[in-house]
Amino acid sequence: MSKPRPWNIFAWIWLLVIFLRELTLSAWDVIKATLSPEIRARPGVVAVPLRLRSKAGVTLLADMVTLTPGTTALHVSEDRSILYVHVMNIESPEAVRQSIADRLERPTMRVLS
């Protein structure tokens, strides 16, 4: 039998730091867009493929996406393989996918592994 692994407190702290960074940067982008005299936003919905499959992992990721200003998790596919995200300003769908995968999903995977 394998021993259960204790939660890695450092991974949780790192995830919190990353999330707070994303929160701050996104809030700043929303503030700039709101106060700008010109509307430059290009909103849209992006399908983000997920490597996370657990309910807890997908829920944590979707919550972080929704709490980040300028993005909202809209729906998760039945098999939990795709997260649909509304984004306030899409420069490229691939950039949005990569950003969520690198900045939020990967640290979430570390925390829950």
Image: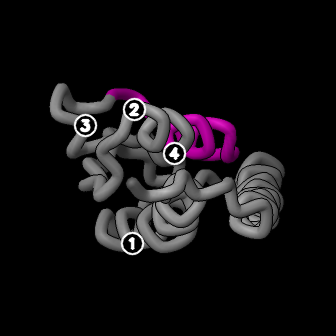
Whether residue 70 appears in magenta in the rendering, the answer is yes
Q: Secondary structure at mark 1?
A: helix
Residue at left 58%, top 35%? 63
Distance from label 3 to label 2 (Cα)?
A: 8 Å
Is 26 situated left or right of 104 in this image? right
Is 87 situated left or right of 54 in this image? right
Q: Secondary structure at mark 2?
A: helix
- Judging by the rendered image, the residue that carries numbered circle 1 is 98
Distance from label 3 to label 4 (Cα)?
A: 12 Å
Residue at left 44%, top 46%? 43
Q: Magenta span covers which residues?
A: 61-75
Q: Secondary structure at mark 3?
A: loop
Q: Amino acid at mark 1?
A: Gln
Q: Is residue 35 above or below residue 62?
A: below
Q: Position of residue 58 (x, y in %)?
A: 42, 40
Location of residue 40 by image quarter: bottom right
Nearer the observer, 11 or 1: 1
Residue at left 47%, top 47%? 87
- Judging by the rendered image, the residue that carries numbered circle 2 is 55
Name the mark on residue 80.
Answer: 3
Distance from label 3 to label 1 (Cα)?
A: 18 Å
Distance from label 2 to label 4 (Cα)?
A: 10 Å
Q: Secondary structure at mark 4?
A: helix
Q: Earlier in the sequence, mark 2 or mark 4?
A: 2
Q: Amino acid at mark 4?
A: Leu
Q: Is residue 101 above or below residue 4?
A: below
Q: Is residue 32 visible?
A: no
Q: Earlier in the sequence, mark 3 or mark 2?
A: 2
Q: Are marks 2 and 4 in contact (CB under 8 Å)?
A: no
